Amino acid sequence: MILNTERLYLREMKQSDFNSLCKILKDEETMYAYEGAFDDTEAQEWLDRQISRYHTYGFGLWAVILKESEEMIGQCGLSMQPWKEEELLEVGYLFQRAYWHNGYATEAARACKQYAFDILKADQVCSIIRDTNLASQQVAIRNGMVQTDSWTKHYRGIDMPHYLFVVYKK
């Protein structure tokens, strides 16, 4: 276990989490900010990338487990992400649609922010969010972040405007 909150715990994802991960990545509505659902190959590449990040950085997106059911309901964690000419430490989150609007993303994201400050000794952490993803922007705001910049990323053959939300260690 990496992190423990009131209702959740976060741990490294493993291959046996693939089917739970696919409930997120293969859902068209959940993945609207990525311009559509992933196929099996893209989902496996996503999982492989997280596992690689654990080895390279000691962190990545982690499985979010709902304590009351022991079910993986999402993923939340930290990763190094490109922003213009630099790499930034980002709190990222994606949850199964069935678990939206219950405060789980905010609960997990706040724990990841504290991990970044307390364990990684980061001075700042950010969330990079698609301009159309209002729900994720609200999670960032509830996590103490403010929008500081915007940039258009090219992903999956499409130009996608993104906002940079940042919070600094107090």
Image: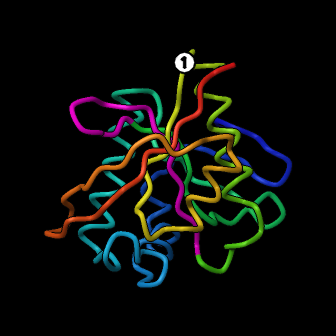
Q: State which region is magenta.
A: 80-96
Front position in the image: 119 or 156: 156
Query: Residue furthest toward the top?
Result: 121
Tally the marks. Answer: 1
Q: Position of residue 154 (x, y in %)?
A: 18, 59
Majority secondary structure in the magenta region: strand
Quarter holding the C terminus is top right
Quarter holding the N terminus is top right
Q: Position of residue 81 (x, y in %)?
A: 34, 39
Tell me, yes or no, whether the highlighted magenta stretch contains residue 57. Answer: no
* Residue underneath mark 1: 123
Q: Position of residue 98 (x, y in %)?
A: 66, 80
Front position in the image: 168 or 149: 149
Q: Residue at x 76, y 40 (%)?
A: 4
Tell me, yes or no, whether the highlighted magenta stretch contains residue 87. Answer: yes
Q: Residue at x 52, y 70 (%)?
A: 20
Q: Position of residue 23 (x, y in %)?
A: 50, 76
Front position in the image: 76 or 14: 76
Left or right of 80, for residue 63:
right
Rate crowding at label 1 as few (under 14), some (14 to 19) or many (20 or more) other CA atoms within 10 Å: few
Instruction: Specify the amino acid type for callout 1.
Output: Asp
